Image (cartoon, grey):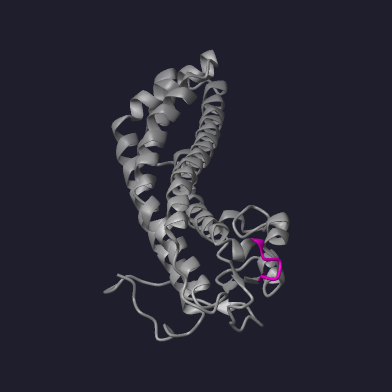
Amino acid sequence: MLKIRKESQNKVFPLYDFLDVIDLMKDNVKAEIKATLFKKFQENAALFADLFIREVKKKDGKAKKELKKFVIPIILKILKKYNDPAIDAGMNLSEKILSGKIKKTPHWWTKAEKKKWLKRKRELIDTNEGYAISLLEMACDSYIIDTEALLMEMISAGTAKEKVKEKIAENIKTVGRETGKYFNAVSDTSESYLFRTADKTMKEAFEIDTQVIEDSKTLWKWVTFHVNSCPDCIERHGQIKSYAEWEAEGLPRTGMTVCRSHCHCVLVPTDYEIDVKMPLPRERAKLEGM
């Protein structure tokens, strides 16, 4: 349960709330991914060591195929559990922005809008899973390359085959440098996935409410939260553009800022009045009792 903040009635609170929910989900999913990988790799260390050694000798790509076949379904199963919570976070923020902030009246979707959303929700999930698979495949490729470099270093030095296999298995079991880097890359996928899911939900909600996206009079303000903000985001803080202009320049978390997928900035319509003269201070939320 999220710890309630004193400033909960402030207009900036829904933005805090959105980021807190995503951050807490991210922490949970990262911990689950790392714990699951640790257990699975412990159980299959010898098998992976053999595959890596075989890859160095035959260069047939079997190690990459087997690693992807083994890891990706496990990670996708974990990520899928967080689809609805991430979608809810994006939907909740979009509703708070839309309700009474642009139309000046409470916002409810019609039956047609709800039907359109259900179709887009399925498409959104499918697209994001494809995105996650691409990131996980790249992480697997990098892990193979890093492990091959370690193998070549030992083999070229004349290390006995048994010792090489023993060292690779040890690297896997103890989460050595190469394996640790891989675990981090895989778990980092969750942050991109959760934010991308929530961001796309907000965009779909705004597009269904065509008054918001298509109305050229609606301008959007870039809001930066002061949590290790990157120089690009600090520079963009408070800037105002149309949604189309922000899409062309790069929305938050689309790779156009130094922080890339770690970006914690939010776009809000200028009708949603908050003081953004300086980047907004924000502390991470904590679970009750922690």
The answer to whether residue 80 is visible is yes
In the rendered image, residue 247, in percent from the top left (x then y), is placed at: 68, 56
Q: Is 162 in front, or is 48?
A: 48
Number of callouts:
0
What residue is shown at x 37% (from left), y 45% (from top)? Answer: 80
> On the rendered image, what quadrant is the C terminus found in?
bottom left
Q: Main secondary structure of the magenta part?
A: loop
What residue is shown at x 47% (from left), y 68% (from top)? Answer: 95
Magenta run includes residue 217? yes
Q: Is 108 in front, or is 270?
A: 108
Q: Is 261 in front, or is 222?
A: 222
212 w.r.t. 119: above or below: below
In the rendered image, residue 273, in percent from the top left (x then y), is placed at: 59, 82
> On the rendered image, what quadrant is the N terminus found in?
bottom left
Q: Residue furthest left?
A: 289
The answer to whether residue 163 is visible is no
Residue segment shown in magenta: 214-219
Magenta run includes residue 218? yes
In the rendered image, residue 26, in percent from the top left (x then y), is placed at: 42, 57
Examine the image and state in which quarter residue 38 appears. top left
39 w.r.t. 148: above or below: below
46 w.r.t. 243: above or below: above
Residue 9 is left or right of residue 241, and the answer is left
Residue 161 is left or right of residue 211, and the answer is left
In the rendered image, residue 207, in percent from the top left (x then y), is placed at: 57, 57
